[in-house]
Image (tube, rainbow, N blue to C red):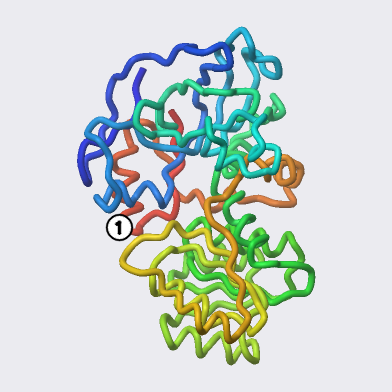
Amino acid sequence: MRATVIHAPHDIRVEEVPDPVVQQPTDVVLRVLRACICGSDLWAYRGESARQPGQRIGHEFLGVVEEAGAEVTGLRPGDLVVAPFVWSDGICEYCAAGLQTSCPRGGFWGSVGSDGGQGEAVRVPFADGTLVKLPADAASDDRLLTALLALSDVLGTGHHAAVGAGVTRGTTVAVVGDGAVGLCGVLAAKRLGAERIIALGRHEARTDIARTFGATDVVAERGDAAVEAVRELTGGGAHAVIEAVGTEQSMRTAVGITRDGGAIGYVGVPHGSGTGLDLSVMFDRNISLRGGVAPVRAYIPELLPDVLDGSVDPSPVFDLSVGLDGVPAGYRAMDERTALKVLVKP
């Protein structure tokens, strides 16, 4: 089969690799119908996170079960399923607590020795604990299939940030980051009943999506100017702040725009030197910090009905579509910020 591999910074290739096969009785082999490129993939692309030459890449995908191991009980060939960005056994104490990202037998797609999602097929370990079955007729609905793909990561991650920030009905929310996760954070905040949602961003195409998703205000300033603007708009800061970037500056901004007694939900993958956190400031102002890597497997059952009925539609975050051969160009487009999030149709 063909799959995307990374050889070095800025060196993404689509190559012939061995076909995946059932290795354990709890595995399935999945034929990929939709995948995508994540903003976090860019850290490997830019050389800011280490990868071995020839390592697979990609962790967001959905598809059809082609073959199932002897101990797989909940799935059968022909089933349409979505894969969270982490596989998990579904039976450990962490999985039972809804923290599948901490499963001792779990792992990330594209890690050394595992398949990546940006390919024609994937071997899925612990399929019963990992995959979520989708309605079969969704496979013939292109828009719906694209929206359902967001359940693999970006929608659940935005939801995780909103939950961590304590978004409830009537709250004022500010979102730091105008990438796909930040935009899904806007969508999640709207779904949870936020009364006012302030999106921080200066790219008009992205802030237009933010408004479509429910943002009531847009702040284009950055740094101290952004903090001042949000605090003026809100009379002291937002009750709930979503941090969806992961840089020192973005975290400083998040702390600065949080109202005393408020909370920050952080899901931006930390990178760069330092974190931007001043614990004494957070202590004095009673600001809470919650978040981290999102256990999207726990959120899919909650979010799926709203995606299926169209009341939540994250599909606009995918603004460029490519075939498998177009994946290297898709990485370049996202790196150069000419694309927000690239959809891959193998």
Residue 257 image position (x, y, % from top left)? 55, 82
Q: Residue furthest top?
A: 70
Q: Which residue occupies 55% across, 77% down?
A: 218
**Residue 112 to residue 214: above or below:** above
Tag 1 residue: 336
- Amino acid found under the numbered disc labelled 1: Glu
Image quadrant holding the N terminus, namely top left
Residue 93 in picture, x, y percent from top left:
67, 37
Count of numbered labels shown in the rendering: 1
On screen, 190 above or below 171?
Answer: above
Residue lying at 41% horizontally and 82% vertically, measured from the top left = 223
Q: Is 291 situated left or right of 93 in this image?
A: left
Check the image and report above or below for 91 versus 275.
Answer: above
Q: Is residue 148 left or right of residue 30?
A: right
Q: Residues within 10 Å of mark 1 (few under 14, many from 20)?
A: few
Q: Residue at x 63, y 24 (%)?
A: 80
Image height of 18 relative to 55, above or below? above
Which residue is at the far right? Answer: 169
Residue at left 60%, top 28%?
Answer: 89
- SS category of the residue bearing label 1: loop
Q: Quadrant of residue 282?
A: bottom right
> x, y (%) of residue 123?
48, 20
